[in-house]
Amino acid sequence: MTANSMAPETIFRGRLIAIGGNEDRVDEQEVLTRVVHEIGKVNYKVVVIPTASEEPEQRGKDYHRVFTSLGAETVKVIDISKRSQANNKALAKKLEDADLIFLTGGDQLRLTTLLGGTWVLDAIHERLRAGALVAGTSAGAAVFSDTMIYEGKSEEGLLKGGVLTTSGFGFVENIIFDTHFLDRGRIGRLMQIVTTNPTCIGVGLGEDSGVILKGDGTAEVIGTGQVIIVDGSDIKHSNIMNIESGGPIAIDNIRIHSLVNGYGYDFKKRSFLSSQSLTK
């Protein structure tokens, strides 16, 4: 039996698309067009939650315009700025018929602080169980994880304690998403996370790129950029237990994959998928 076969299984709790941020909302709209395609129906209804944004009204207008132009029957924007709103059953009820729930970018800690443990989050989980699609960009994708990165400077990613985490929304288990990954040089953040717990697989989402998480435990990459997978299951040695906070981390035999549009990753087998294998 291999180490990989003994690893806890990655779990996706529904139909999910995680996007790295700054997706094209004006020209080709490649990523968002694919999001709409994955809904799987023509007369679809969208709920946009711009809570993470510092400019929720503008973000709501942006995505209302985009999804309307892409054929949505209705687009509701639900801006939640207080926990009391998120615990309003009448507000949560507005998600009941959503075919797509879209979480915008901004600050993921704002999202978890305002929505965690509320009726609105329960309603999102219920829609996932019912087969609706949930997509998130930037902060809206970071919250998908059961363990979520919420702070850590890129240049301190490989210094012990330089990455801070908390609980996310738990749409997936044993995966940690990081966003704006290449533009902001965040490889060290995921390397530290998977070194401290190699059960987790790190997924670094580039801008205008994303992953479609599928029911068979695989992911397909979409968009114009790259997605980086960081897998620590074969790590042979690290010094992280033996150094003080702030000390530089040594790691032996961490695995990194670079994926682009049409390629994928099998989270159960922890293996790279070529474009040919995804189309079989």
Image: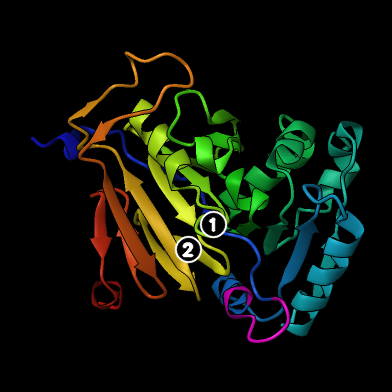
Q: Position of residue 156 (x, y in %)?
A: 51, 35
Task: Give the main secondary structure, helix, strand or loop, of the magenta stretch.
Answer: loop
For the C terminus, give its image quadrant.
bottom left
Expressed as whole percent of the image width and height from the top left, the position of residue 255 reads: 25, 47
Residue located at (58% from left, 74% from top): 31
Q: Is residue 229 left or right of residue 81?
A: left
- Bounds of the magenta span? 25-32
Of the pair 44 and 155, the residue shown nearer to us: 155
Q: Amino acid at mark 1?
A: Leu
**Given contact means CB atoms under 8 Å apart, are the residues at marks 2 and 1 in contact?**
yes
The tag on residue 212 is 2
In the current view of this chain or complex, which residue is farthest to the left?
1
Tell me: 51 left or right of 16. Answer: right
Residue 16: assigned label: 1
Quarter of the image for the N terminus: give it: top left
The secondary structure type at the circle numbered 1 is: strand
